[in-house]
Amino acid sequence: METDTSAVSSVDAAAPAVADVVPATPVEVVPAHDPGLVVAIQKFPIAEASRVELLKSFGGFAATARTWLDRAKTVNVTDATQLREMALAREIRLGLKQTRVAANKLKDGLKAETLAYGRAVDSLFNELASRIEPVEEQLQKAEDFAKIAEEKRVKELTASRRAQLEPLVVDKFSLDAYNLGVMNDGAFGELLAGLQAAADQRKREAEEALEAQRKREAEAIEAKRRADLEKVRMQEVLPLMEPGSRVEVDLGAMDDTAFALLLEHLRAARKEKEEKLQRAMDRVKELWEVGGPTYSVPAVEDVLRLSDEDYAWQLAEAREHREAADAKKKAEEDAAAELRRKMELGTARRDELLVLRIKANQVISVAALAELSDAEWADVLATAKREFEAYQADQKRLADEEAEAKRKRDLGHSRFLMLSGTGMVVPLSMAQLSELSEEEVEVEFQKLKAARVAYDKETAEREARQKAEADALAERARLAAASDAEKLAAYADALAAVEKPTLTSQQVGAVVVGEVDGLVHWVREQARLLRS
């Protein structure tokens, strides 16, 4: 629906002048507009009169702000003693703040009036539109009655034809390519016939594919039946076959009679082989029993190949081997019995010597002792006893010396522990401490106690200095990470904590104290303003 612009062409003319809503500003009027304000307002397509009025209203604030900004360029505070510069910075900041607050109030007043004006325009238009739009819509329907009727007929025909065609296509959205509502009956008949033929062809192909699938499934079932039957029959055949041999026939394809004959043949062959093997194993056992444990019995495979005559010869050879082995064994047993007798005699004599604790390199071997006569043995035994008595005397002397050395070690160790209890390094070894008198040990103990007291005092002073330095570093780190308000507050506290100098001139002293206190108060006020 077209909009009649003549009714609203006078909106700009009816808008109130900016001067009607802008309050008088308490700033001086400048003859020329501020360049920055001119650039800022050029982006908005408003009436020239409104543009000039806005520039005039905000121009006074711009001039006042420019004066304060020029003065701010001269402020440069780099030291806490620049009290006048700090006071000037406060004065300029408050002046700029007052200018900004006054300009904000002007802005809010102008925007409120403009918003109310826009809402009044919308209300007047909505009243006119509520009268016009219902009648306009009714007339539009009367004007388009024939067109609406044709669109309804085309829509119904399209729906009817789609209902006939959709069962014949795979993708019903493909019918969107045809303009079914305007197509004549002849063209639609040809389209219907073509799609019906394509649907019949797809149906035949689907039936053929289904039949082929059924045939493949039947063949797969038969192949599985044969494979399963072959697995079952293989479990019966494998125990009857030679290790490593292969089945050369298709067990699954054989009928039951042929498979039964195959099993009978394999069982007969297996029974014959087992009987031959058992006979060979019996002969191996007989050869081992006749020939004895030292006889080299042939392997079962070799015995299988022997004839009865060859086996009789092998059995005779085993008997001859057993007779020769028995004779050799008796001679070895007689020699071993004589050797045992001599070893028992030598061992008994050696044990008697070992009782006397003779060193190993002085003990005669068991074989040599067994060959000694009784007189020779008596001389050896008497010599061993004399050497044992001398050995015992030496051992007693060494034991006494070791006991004295242990006593001194224990004394030195106990004195070392007593001196170490002071926590200081003991300057003497345990051996040196064991040689000192009790008075000398007491003197050393008192020296170490005095040294410990001095060490503890020095350590405490050093730790106190380190803690003070760490606290100072932590405070500086905290201030470095703090906000400007916190830094100013900390600075004011530090400045207040500085001890005031005691001057000869009380007047000068009072002035200094007043100035410093005033500065502390001013810095704390700045911190409070920053927090707000």
Image (cartoon, rainbow, N blue to C red):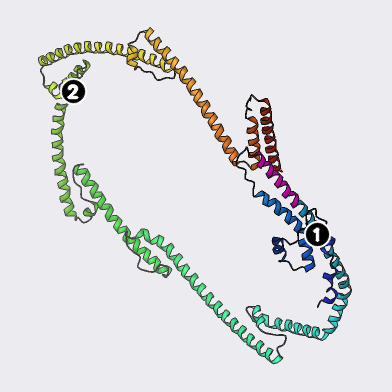
Q: Is residue 42 magenta?
A: no
Q: Which residues are magenta?
A: 80-100
For residue 404, side relative to residue 507 (left or right)? left
Q: Which residue corresponds to the image point at 65% horizontal and 88% vertical from the top-left?
A: 191
> Residue 229: image x %, image y %?
45, 65
Q: Nearer the viewer, residue 425 or 17?
A: 17
Q: Residues within 10 Å of mark 1 (few under 14, many from 20)?
A: some
Q: Nearer the viewer, residue 362 or 111?
A: 111
Q: How far is disc 2 from disc 1 in space, using C-alphas?
A: 135 Å
Query: Which mark identifies residue 344?
Result: 2
Query: Which mark identifies residue 110?
Result: 1
Main secondary-structure element of the magenta-colored stretch = helix
> Residue 520: image x %, image y %?
67, 35
In the image, residue 443 sits, relative to residue 137, either above or below, namely: above
Helix, strand or loop status at disc 2: helix
Q: Quadrant of residue 61?
A: bottom right
Q: Which residue corresponds to the image point at 86% horizontal and 73% vertical from the top-left?
A: 129
Q: Which residue corresponds to the image point at 66% horizontal and 39% vertical from the top-left?
A: 83
Q: Quadrant of residue 307?
A: bottom left
Q: Which residue corresponds to the image point at 46% horizontal and 20% vertical from the top-left?
A: 455
Helix, strand or loop status at disc 1: helix
